[in-house]
Image (tube, coloured by chain):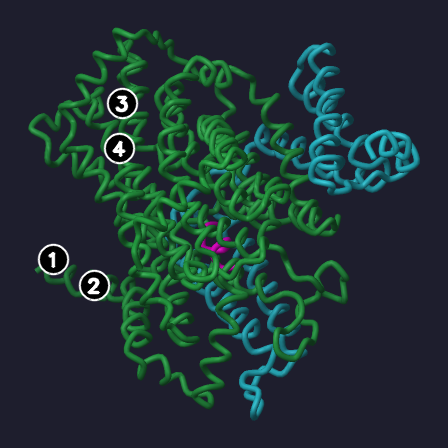
Chain colours: A cyan, B green
């Protein structure tokens, strides 16, 4: 935990410097008749972030915060595995949105999560994997008229939309 | 402003069939969300806000307000039945609710929580009705310097009263404000902070992307981590006789109910405070005032009544600055405020004059939501217990899917979904290191309103910050804000002076 506190402080400090540099691409000083330049607001906010990061690192060095004194691991191996499985499956689902669209990605995610992570029966998994995309389609595409990404499955939906409209 | 005719008109709007249906649905959904361990009103409102595009703004805010109320009621259910707070606002309910459930009085604890929530919510909404119009009238005279001072005070309360690590709190505020500045500069129209010309950043970072990332994805990852162990669910027997006996016993707690309601309401108005400290303070005061403080923590019914009245009253109190000043009093109201912007309304006192149907329909709906939440809560106790028995491996993927689709719908841009995942995983890591996340969400909502207010103020004054100290309202608010910002520093200095004296 102690190391994680330091790493987070340094990474965020570097990010603050990057934000200051990007903000300074616009004027950060006073422009006559216009007031503060467009970059002033984010520049000084990012500078504030940097000051906070310096304070966080100083407090880490002085062992003031509980995290800076903690010798516990940031993540146990079990927590890390859980995090990887959950975050990884989410990333996989979002990536699949681009390829097979929402209605391919959602069942794939549910099958992985319910069957392989949750250890549920194929019957329950199949029921959720079948019903969830249908409910999602009816609510978002038909009721809200918000089109979700369909990827390569786009042509398959033409007859479905023809049925509803 | 004559309140009664406006309120009656509000009731007519709230009781339109569609709005009434939204109240009932919102309460039921909110109750289920609030009952799930780790999820509270803020998660429910953040995840479900994109679903409100189907209905007009009045219906949308009524629906979200009902979810907010429902979730405040629901938080107590898992606190009592599982010993795990449904949300941070229900932490104090666990202290006496869980022991009562383990003693075989789960039904009494649940009824006490529901009734206390109803009383707290009712007192809160009555105070809200009385205070909102005069406050809005005063706020109508505010210009850019007053608005900026108010926003600074909202952030200052997190520093002065938040109780979290100060540098991390400030960092959270700054990063939220920077994210709010991404996109096109409001005056010159030039792109700024678009990170190498990535097209998705040109439209800015939608506050929902950050809110769902933090309160959806990060919260679920956190809940999955902390709920690795198994939980034991208590049994509850609900019958007419037992319900009536519980209600009779509750009559003896009227003093605690009133104390919790008033305390919760006024704590709820403060932006950094809200329902969680309100509930904890009410519990502390009830215990201090009690003749039998030793019974607290062992199943004293007052130990449920105090936090439950307070957290419901606080949730209504948090809406007062949101509607009248355009300053949210809690993370949930920050998301509601962002919703108002999405629905095309300008948050602040002008909504009272420009959109009275919206405001008064919403206020009247709170009365109805309070009643429906009570009825649904009591009627569906067995259903909530059934839901709590569902394995988390079924609930989690459904919530994840809602988050992903909910993150896509507002802008219809996959860039925002990826960004939400980054915020979700980053927010989870930062939460593990005790970075408070609520200030960041408040900041991304208020940032796009604060920047023009500051720039206009400085333009009026020719670049002098003195403008914040020469106008009566602005100077009072700004002085308060500066006092709150300096409060932790003064405390450190005071402690250092006091320590050597104590040693001597």
Q: Position of residue B231 (x, y in %)?
A: 45, 17
The residues bearing labels 4 and 3 have C-alpha atoms spaced at a distance of 10 Å
Q: Are marks 4 and 3 on the same chain?
A: yes
Q: Position of residue A155 (x, y in %)?
A: 93, 36
Nearest to the observer: residue A134 or residue B206: A134
Neighbour tally class for label 3: few under 14, some 14-19, many 20 plus, Cα within 10 Å: many
Most frequent secondary structure within the magenta stretch:
helix
Residue numbers of the magenta segment: B437-444
N-term-proximal mark, 3 vs 1: 3
Of all chains, the one bearing label 3 is: B
Residue occupying the point 51% across, 37% down: B19
- Mark 2 element type: helix
Residue that numbered label 1 is attached to = B503
Neighbour tally class for label 4: few under 14, some 14-19, many 20 plus, Cα within 10 Å: many
Residue occupying the point 34% across, 7% down: B237
The residues bearing labels 2 and 3 have C-alpha atoms spaced at a distance of 45 Å
Residue that numbered label 2 is attached to = B496
Q: Are marks 4 and 1 on the same chain?
A: yes
Q: How many marks?
A: 4
Label 4 or label 2, whichever lies nearer to me, is: 4
The residues bearing labels 1 and 2 have C-alpha atoms spaced at a distance of 11 Å
N-term-proximal mark, 4 vs 2: 4
């Amino acid at each position: 935990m102690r190391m994680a506190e330091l790493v987070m402080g340094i990474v965020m400090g570097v990010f603050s410097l990057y934000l200051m540099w990007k903000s300074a691409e616009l004027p950060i000083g006073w422009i006559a008749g216009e007031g503060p330049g467009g970059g002033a607001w984010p520049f000084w906010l990012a500078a504030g972030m940097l000051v906070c990061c310096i304070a966080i690192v100083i407090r880490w060095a002085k062992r003031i915060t509980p995290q800076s004194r903690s010798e516990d691991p940031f993540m146990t191996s079990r927590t890390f595995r859980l995090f990887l499985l959950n975050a990884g499956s989410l990333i996989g689902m979002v990536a699949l949105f681009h390829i097979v669209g929402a209605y391919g990605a959602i069942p794939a995610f549910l099958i992985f999560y319910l069957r392989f992570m949750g250890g549920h029966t194929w019957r329950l998994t199949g029921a959720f994997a079948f019903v969830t995309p249908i409910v999602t389609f009816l609510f978002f595409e038909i009721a809200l008229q918000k089109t979700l990404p369909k990827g390569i499955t786009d042509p398959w939906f033409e007859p479905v939309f023809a049925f509803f409209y | 402003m004559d309140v009664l005719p406006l309120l009656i008109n509000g009731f007519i709007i709230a009781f339109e069939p569609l709005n009434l249906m939204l109240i009932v649905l919102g309460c039921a959904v909110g109750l289920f969300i609030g009952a799930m361990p780790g999820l509270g009103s803020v998660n429910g409102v953040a995840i479900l806000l994109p679903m409100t595009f189907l209905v007009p703004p009045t219906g949308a805010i009524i629906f979200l307000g009902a979810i907010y109320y429902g979730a405040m009621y629901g938080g107590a259910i898992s606190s009592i039945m599982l010993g795990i707070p449904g949300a941070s606002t229900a932490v104090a309910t666990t202290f006496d609710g869980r022991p009562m459930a383990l003693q075989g009085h789960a039904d009494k604890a649940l009824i006490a929580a529901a009734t206390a929530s109803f009383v707290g919510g009712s007192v809160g909404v009555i105070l809200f009705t009385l205070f909102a119009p005069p406050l809005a009238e005063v706020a109508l005279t505010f210009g850019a310097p007053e608005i900026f001072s108010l926003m600074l005070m909202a952030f200052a309360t997190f520093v002065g009263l938040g109780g979290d690590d100060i540098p991390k709190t400030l960092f959270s505020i700054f990063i939220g404000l920077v994210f709010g500045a991404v996109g096109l500069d409001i005056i010159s129209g030039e792109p700024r902070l678009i990170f190498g010309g990535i097209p998705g950043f040109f439209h800015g970072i939608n506050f929902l992307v950050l809110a769902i990332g933090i309160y959806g994805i990060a919260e679920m990852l956190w809940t999955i981590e902390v709920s690795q162990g198994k939980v034991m669910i208590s049994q509850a027997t609900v019958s007419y006789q037992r319900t009536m006996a519980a209600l009779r016993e509750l009559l003896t707690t009227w003093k605690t109910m009133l104390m919790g309601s008033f305390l919760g309401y006024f704590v709820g108005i403060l932006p950094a405070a809200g329902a969680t400290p309100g509930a904890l303070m009410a519990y502390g005061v009830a215990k201090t005032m009690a003749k039998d403080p030793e019974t607290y923590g062992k199943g004293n019914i007052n130990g449920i009544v105090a936090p439950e009245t307070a957290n419901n009253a606080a949730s209504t109190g948090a809406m007062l600055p949101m509607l009248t000043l355009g300053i949210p009093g809690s993370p949930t109201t920050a998301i509601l405020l962002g919703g108002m912007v999405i629905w095309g309304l300008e948050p602040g006192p002008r909504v009272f004059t420009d959109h009275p149907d919206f405001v008064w329909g919403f206020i009247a709906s709170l009365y109805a939501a309070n009643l429906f939440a009570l009825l649904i809560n009591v009627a569906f106790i067995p259903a909530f217990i059934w839901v709590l028995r569902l394995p988390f491996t079924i609930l989690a993927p459904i919530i994840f899917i809602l988050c992903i689709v909910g993150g896509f719908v507002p802008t219809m841009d996959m860039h925002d979904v990826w960004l939400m995942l980054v915020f979700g995983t980053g927010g989870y890591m930062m939460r593990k290191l005790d970075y408070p996340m609520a200030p960041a969400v408040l900041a991304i909502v208020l940032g796009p309103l604060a920047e023009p207010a500051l720039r206009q103020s400085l333009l009026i004054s020719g670049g002098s910050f003195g403008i914040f100290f020469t106008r009566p309202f602005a100077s009072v608010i700004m002085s308060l804000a500066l006092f709150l910002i300096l409060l932790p520093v003064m405390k450190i200095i005071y402690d250092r002076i006091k320590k050597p004296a104590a040693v001597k």
